[in-house]
Image (tube, rainbow, N blue to C red):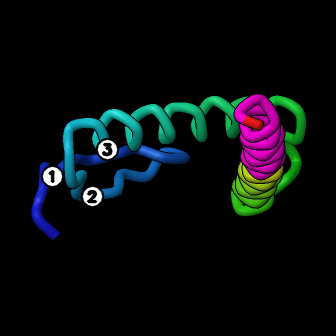
């Protein structure tokens, strides 16, 4: 994979990665920052839990957010299609 070599630090560990575009690099850096911020919150809330458990919580939280966003997007697409159908029917009725 070609692209910019970057190093991201997540949960105190550095990961050498490649970003295919400057936009992807920016998104990767923002994502790593958000992961670390959520992990810090879990560290405060659950100091007795293992790092792996807290990373699992972060992962679950992000997966739930992604699924929620996908469902919301699907609803928007469905509503847009319904509005398009209604508009098409309205315009067809006007032409008659």
- How many neighbours does mark 2 have within 10 angstroms: few (below 14), some (14-19), or many (20 or more)? some
> Cβ–Cβ below 8 Å for labels 1 and 2?
yes
- Secondary structure state at the residue bearing disc 3: helix
Q: CA distance from mark 3 to mark 1?
A: 11 Å
Which quadrant does the C terminus fall into? Answer: top right
The residue lying at 60 percent from left, 40 percent from top is 35
Graded by Cα atoms within 10 Å as few (under 14), some (14 to 19) or many (20 or more), the crowding at tag 3 reads some
Of 42 and 19, the residue lying toward us:
19
Q: Looking at the rendering, which quadrant does residue 51 occupy?
A: bottom right
The image shows residue 10 at horizontal and vertical percentages of 48, 46
Of the numbered discs 2 and 3, the one sitting upstream in the chain is 2
Where on the picture, by quarter, is residue 28? top left
CA gap between label 2 and label 3 equals 11 Å
Q: Position of residue 77 (x, y in %)?
A: 73, 47
Label 1 crowding class (10 Å Cα cut-off): few <14, some 14-19, many 20+?
Answer: few
Q: Which residues are magenta?
A: 73-95
Q: CA distance from mark 1 to mark 2?
A: 6 Å
Task: Locate the N terminus by quadrant.
Answer: bottom left
Residue under numbered circle 3: 24
Name the front one of labels 2 and 3. Answer: 3
Q: Secondary structure at mark 1?
A: strand
The disc label shown at residue 5, or none? 1
Helix, strand or loop status at disc 2: strand
- Residue behind mark 2: 17
Left/right of residue 73 with respect to residue 25 in the rendered view: right
Mark nearer the N terminus (3 vs 1): 1
Q: Are marks 3 and 1 in contact (CB under 8 Å)?
A: no
């Amino acid at each position: 994979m070609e692209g910019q070599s970057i190093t991201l630090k997540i949960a105190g560990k550095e990961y050498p990665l490649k970003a295919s575009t400057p936009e992807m690099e920016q998104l990767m850096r923002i994502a790593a920052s958000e992961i670390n911020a959520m992990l810090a919150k879990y560290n405060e809330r659950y100091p007795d839990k293992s790092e792996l458990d807290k990373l699992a919580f972060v992962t679950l939280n992000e997966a739930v957010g992604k699924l929620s966003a996908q469902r919301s997007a699907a609803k928007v697409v469905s509503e847009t299609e319904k509005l398009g159908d209604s508009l098409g029917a309205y315009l067809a009725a006007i032409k008659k």
